Image: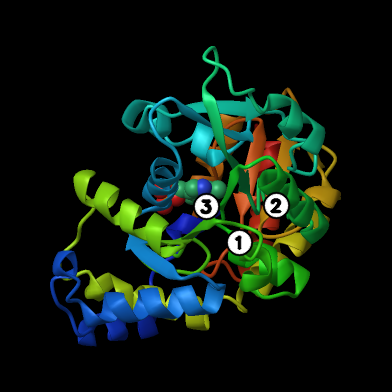
Amino acid sequence: MIDFRSDTVTKPTPAMRAAMAQAEVGDDVYGDDPTVNHLQEMAAEMFGFDGALFVCSGTQANLLALMAHCERGDEYLCGQQAHNYKFEGGGAAVLGSIQPQPLSNQIDGSILLSDIEAAIKPDDIHFARTRLLSLENTIGGKVLSQEYLAKAQALAFNRGLKIHLDGARVANAAVAQGIAIADITQYFDSVSICLSKGLCAPIGSILLGDERLISKATRWRKMLGGGMRQAGIIAAAAKLAITDQVERLAEDHDNARLLAQLLAEISEITVDLAAVQTNMVFVQLADDINPTILADILRRKGILISGGHNLRLVTHHDISQQDIITFVHEFKHALLKC
Ligand SMILES: *Cc1c(COP(=O)(O)O)cnc(C)c1O
């Protein structure tokens, strides 16, 4: 199947499978797994932090960060479209007693600095304590500018807030700008990075922070049932995700651009070319197209897309340039039938 639903569908590479088979392991809850320890040291060093924690998902990494920064009755500022507000089951509120204060995302994915300023609550018994600003990069496939990040960091610092990055796809943001991941993560007190998306690891995310944050996060991870034992098996693949898979993301970005350009020529759909900055293409179907029938026809041709009139197509390691051309061909035919 050619699967455009998400970059989470990428399978581990042959090199990852070999590394997993040979991984040296120990009990990571005791801190004894040499492969996990090496991954965490490598990640801390590469991305410019004192510490790193290997966790089972991006959702868990974000939750641990929120719970490490905030206490019961605190709040975090984030975008209305933020994954850690909209798509993580309300975990910060449910499990952390932390209130989200969502703010509008602009077309470019940023949150206006003036909106952030205005949302910071005064120190008054009526209000939750505003503790943290949480940004996301990339957001909806879009890259936040380095100038914006610098300004957001300065604002957070001046107002006594901590600043977290949901960097699930921060590697895509770095590659799109031709800079290092550390150039982006430098602006943040904590960062979560997904290794199981475009970077192809089967499982796992990394949380970055200072020693205090990582030690709090390690305690919460254990409480949440995220303490893993011989986790070196998956950490072996995760190491290759950060060493071998980052630069390759440029191919996904090229494929997304090619896909968008080819789709832009089709009259029944609208493609926002300016929004194609990394590995995502958003396609608006005309109202009279039935998206369920469209998806069904394509499935029978070996192509998977998610439903709805606003399609998100994601390019990744397991989609080649030829797959893009095959998709556009089949997509044009399918549109005639629905
Ligand atoms: C995927 C994603 C997550 C969560 O990662 P999981 O590993 O799926 O839990 C968090 N934030 C963003 C921006 C994501 O895209």
Residue type, numbered disc 2: Gln
> How busy is the neighbourhood of tag 2: few (under 14 within 10 Å), some, or many (20 plus)?
many
Q: Residue furthest top?
A: 126
Question: Can you give x and y, in whole percent of width and height, for residue 297 in the image?
Answer: 54, 42
Query: Which quarter of the image is occupied by the C terminus?
Result: top right
User: What residue is drawn where x is 39% and y is 58%?
Assistant: 212
Which SS class for mark 1?
helix
- Alpha-carbon span between mark 2 and mark 1: 16 Å
**Are the two marked residues, 2 and 1, in contact with CB atoms closer than 8 angstroms?**
no
Q: Can residue 321 be seen by looking at this rendering? A: no
Residue 6 has which mark? 3
- Which residue is drawn at the image coordinates 75% and 75% (left, top)? 178
Looking at the rendered structure, the secondary structure element under dot 2 is helix
Q: Quadrant of residue 38?
A: bottom left
- Left or right of residue 179, residue 206 in this image: left
Whether residue 20 sits left or right of residue 46 in the image: it is left
For marks 1 and 3, the one nearer the N-term is 3
Colouring: rainbow
- Disc 1 residue type? Val
Residue 295: image tag: none
Q: Residues within 10 Å of mark 1 (few under 14, many from 20)?
A: many
Residue indicated by mark 2? 153
* Whole-number angstrom distance, CA of label 2 to CA of label 3: 30 Å
The residue closer to the viewer here, 312 or 176, is 176
* Residue type at the position of mark 3: Ser
- Per the model, the C-alpha gap separating discs 1 and 3 is 16 Å
- Name the residue beneath numbered marker 1: 170
Q: Nearer the viewer, mark 2 or mark 1?
A: 2
Question: Residue placed at 68% from the left, 73% from the top?
Answer: 250
Instruction: Check the image and report above or below for 299 versus 233.
Output: above
Tell us which disc is closer to us: 1 or 3. 1
